[in-house]
Amino acid sequence: MGQERESTLRIAKRRIEGEALLETAEIIFRPLDGSKRLKFAFADIVKSVKAVDGELRFHTGEGPAVLELGPAAEKWAEKILHPKSRAEKLGVKNAMQVSLLGKFDDDFQKELSAATKNVSAGKITSNSEIIFVAVESAEELSDVARIAKSVKGATGLWVVYPKGKKEITETDVIGACRKTGLKDVKVVGFSPTHTALKFVLPVEKR
């Protein structure tokens, strides 16, 4: 998940009050009246995005759109025009030791390989600085207790799970990891279909 703000959207002669969310690759707007949420993919709007007097302006299939964001408008425009890579958002840096458990798509594995050559798939190395775990259901969280034992010092554990699925929720993920003594510190929109939650050892336990 990205940044979230109360906002007003003006589009197609409509003025809609709601909540705007800046995700990894799209803007999501949730109307307060409960009507269908709107999505604006960066790829579709990037050529027209600009920030003017606290407004984020861009073109859509329905015509010009304006999000009233105040001081945040310029920051949102910058992130849309010059987005960080997914690996950067997840904290992966050059030469870091990264471990992967579970099924990750080829695109993500290529991104990791471009960021660091030290990637271990299917096994957690003893010197892991970041551990990624992919789960598709709450039942798969049963291994968290075992995996958490590999989290030492400032090692980060990212749990990647599906969005909007009853089989597994944010509450399930947070609950399972907190039981092991880990603390949730960050949320990132991993993809249009998945969310990533980061957990670490509390400072006093390192």
Image (cartoon, rainbow, N blue to C red):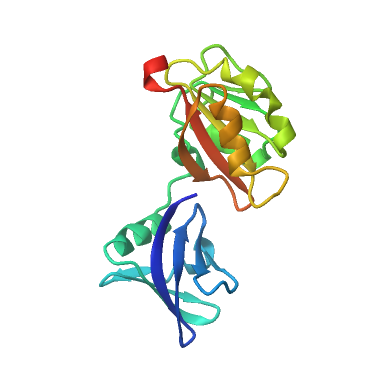
151 versus 178 height, above or below: above
Residue at horizontal 61%, vertical 18%? 124
Residue at horizontal 43%, vertical 30%? 93
The residue nearer to you, when weighing 59 against 170, is 170
The residue nearer to you, when weighing 73 against 19, is 19
* Quarter occupied by residue 185: top left
117 versus 149 height, above or below: below
Residue at horizontal 68%, vertical 30%? 141
Is residue 159 at all visible to an observer of this figure? Answer: no
Is residue 188 at all visible to an observer of this figure? Answer: yes
> Residue pushed farthest bottom?
13
Q: Position of residue 105 (x, y in %)?
A: 68, 40
Q: Position of residue 112 (x, y in %)?
A: 55, 33
Q: Position of residue 100 (x, y in %)?
A: 62, 27
Q: Position of residue 9 (x, y in %)?
A: 43, 75
Q: Quadrant of the C terminus?
A: top left
Count numbered badges in the picture.
Answer: 0
The residue nearer to you, when weighing 83 against 11, is 11
- On screen, residue 118 versus residue 135, left or right, reads left
* Quarter occupied by residue 177: top right
